[in-house]
């Protein structure tokens, strides 16, 4: 890990501020002052100090957003040996796990955390965290079809809660619809559109609660900002009972 990243992760300063500390000659690794911005450290073995004071990595909870590509199973271990999302997130974070799941062929926002308590809340139906999807469909649904989704549609495991539905594209090619649901049942969006006889061709999750991709390329991850974590906590508690 780059030294400035280590310092930022440890809460010493921002990454930029950490670089300033380094170039000012205030950072030592194993007793040697390091000013080169490309310097790397092994957080498990190297002793990093700022102004002579040893800095430890904060072992607090970690929150990550991945822009999941198609073709990866949402699990940290697949007995069938298929590619898993584990390959796409940092390997040096013990206890990191996906918060909920996306189907093999679904792309977009997938959260990961080491914070089991928050994950549990985010996934619990009573907290109603909004999830928004862009859906490419087979055939053009009529207004009545979409209204059925808006008011709640019967699936084999019970009726769905009201959803927000917006038509994004009609005309040539596959129609595209945006849908926001607050539940997270297995294959729910696909089952909802199958129920109106317009099967999903492609499914992309645009946001999970307050977290969106914000230009994150497919297959890449980023740490959530402190504001995003606070907003997620707010989402998970404000509608709780
Ligand atoms: N709904 C689905 O049908 N699939 C997903 O991957 C996510 C939501």
Image (cartoon, grey):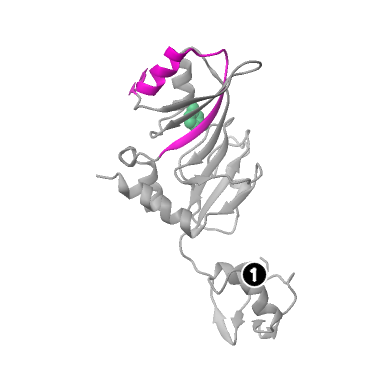
Q: Kindly indicate the quadrant of the structure image that contains residue 182.
A: top left
Q: Is residue 115 visible?
A: no
Residue placed at 55% from the left, 74% from the top?
12
The answer to whether residue 225 is above or below residue 35 is: above
Q: Which residues are magenta?
A: 130-159
Q: How packed is label 1: few (under 14 Cα within 10 Å), some, or many (20 or more)?
A: few
Left or right: 14, with 233 as reference point: right
Residue in front for this viewpoint, 103 or 107:
107
Q: Position of residue 144 (x, y in %)?
A: 42, 13
Location of residue 66 in the rendering, given as x and y in whole percent from the top left corner: 58, 46
Asked if 233 appears above or below 198 in the picture, the reply is below
Disc 1 C-beta below 8 A from ligand 1:
no
Please indicate whether residue 42 sits to the left or right of residue 207 in the image: right
Q: Position of residue 75 (x, y in %)?
A: 53, 41
**Residue corresponding to mark 1:** 16
Percent position (x, y) of residue 240? 28, 45
Camera-nearest residue between 97 and 226: 226
Q: Residue at x 57, y 44 (%)?
A: 213
């Amino acid at each position: 890990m780059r030294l400035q990243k280590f310092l930022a992760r440890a809460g010493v300063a921002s990454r930029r501020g950490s670089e300033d500390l380094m170039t000012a000659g205030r950072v030592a690794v194993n007793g040697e002052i390091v000013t080169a911005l490309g310097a790397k450290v092994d957080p498990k073995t190297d002793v990093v100090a700022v102004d002579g004071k040893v800095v430890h990595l904060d072992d607090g909870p970690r929150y990550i957003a991945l822009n999941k590509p198609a073709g990866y199973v949402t699990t940290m271990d697949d007995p069938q040996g298929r590619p898993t999302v584990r390959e796409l997130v940092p390997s040096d974070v013990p206890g990191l796990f996906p918060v909920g799941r996306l189907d093999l062929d679904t792309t977009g926002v997938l959260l990961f955390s080491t914070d089991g308590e928050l994950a549990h809340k985010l996934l619990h139906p009573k907290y109603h965290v909004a999830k928004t999807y862009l859906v490419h469909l087979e055939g053009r649904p009529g207004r009545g079809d979409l209204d059925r989704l808006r008011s709640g549609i019967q699936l084999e495991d019970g009726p769905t809660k009201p959803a927000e539905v917006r038509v994004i594209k009609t005309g040539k090619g596959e129609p595209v619809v945006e849908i926001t649901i607050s539940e997270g049942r297995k294959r729910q969006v696909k089952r909802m559109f199958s129920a109106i006889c317009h099967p999903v061709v492609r499914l992309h999750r645009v946001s999970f609660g307050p977290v969106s991709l914000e230009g994150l390329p497919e297959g890449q991850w980023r740490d959530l900002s402190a504001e995003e974590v606070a907003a997620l906590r707010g989402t998970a508690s404000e509608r709780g009972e």
